[in-house]
Image (tube, rainbow, N blue to C red):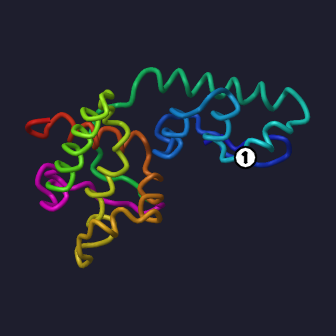
Amino acid sequence: MLPIKLNGNPCNFPTEVHEISLWQYFALRRAKGILDEICALTGIDRQTIQNFKGRADLERCHLLLNTIGAKLAKGIPDKLPKQTTIAGKAVKVPKNLKLEPVGAFIAVHNLVSEELKRCAEQNVEFDPTDIIPQLLAHYFWLPYMGDDVLYSDEKIEDEAYMDQILTMPVTDAVPIANFFFRKYPNL
């Protein structure tokens, strides 16, 4: 992260792909231009950015966006991590993702199947990227919460828990999700 001041406000700007959270990644995908991209990567609200007093801050952001954009264009490495970080907490990635935990395997298989069915009914293309947060929420419930917590669909779908999942580095989240999209039978 590069600590910078924009319009006098201190912020951190990611300079490496592993510094981008899953939330920022989705915000970048929805971005409709440079202002939205700056908001996504700095956490500064749009109005503050629109009120920059000079072009220097905007030009600095543009250069930083080009740098991180070039790195993102090279793709996200596909190597499965041994651990990840969720809301600042180090969490071990299960060694056998296809089987650990069993409830998550079944829930994620059902999630993907339902999404495929929904897309077919609406005649839209299935984009697995859209369900990455839900997939990860199921798989990391027990590793993140601890083995003594009961697996519960309602708790997994809780907005506060989902917000925590979205803090994962995109370089960890995407390879884990891709593992399931490639390995599940009948998908």
First to last magenta residue range: 87-105
**Amino acid of disc 1:** Asp
> 24 or 153: which is nearer to us?
153
**Residue at label 1?**
45
Residue name at image x 56 percent, y 28 percent: 68
Q: Residue at horizontal 81%, vertical 32%?
A: 57
Where residue 62 sits: x, y (%)?
70, 25
Q: Position of residue 146 (x, y in %)?
A: 28, 72
In-front residue for pair 36/77: 36
| Residue at x-position 45% and y-position 52% | 166
Q: Quadrant of residue 185?
A: top left
Quarter of the image containing the N terminus?
top right
The image shows residue 65, relative to residue 113, as above or below, that is above
SS at mark 1 in the image: loop
Using the image as rendered, state which of residue 170 and residue 184 is in the foreground: 184
109 left or right, relative to 42: left
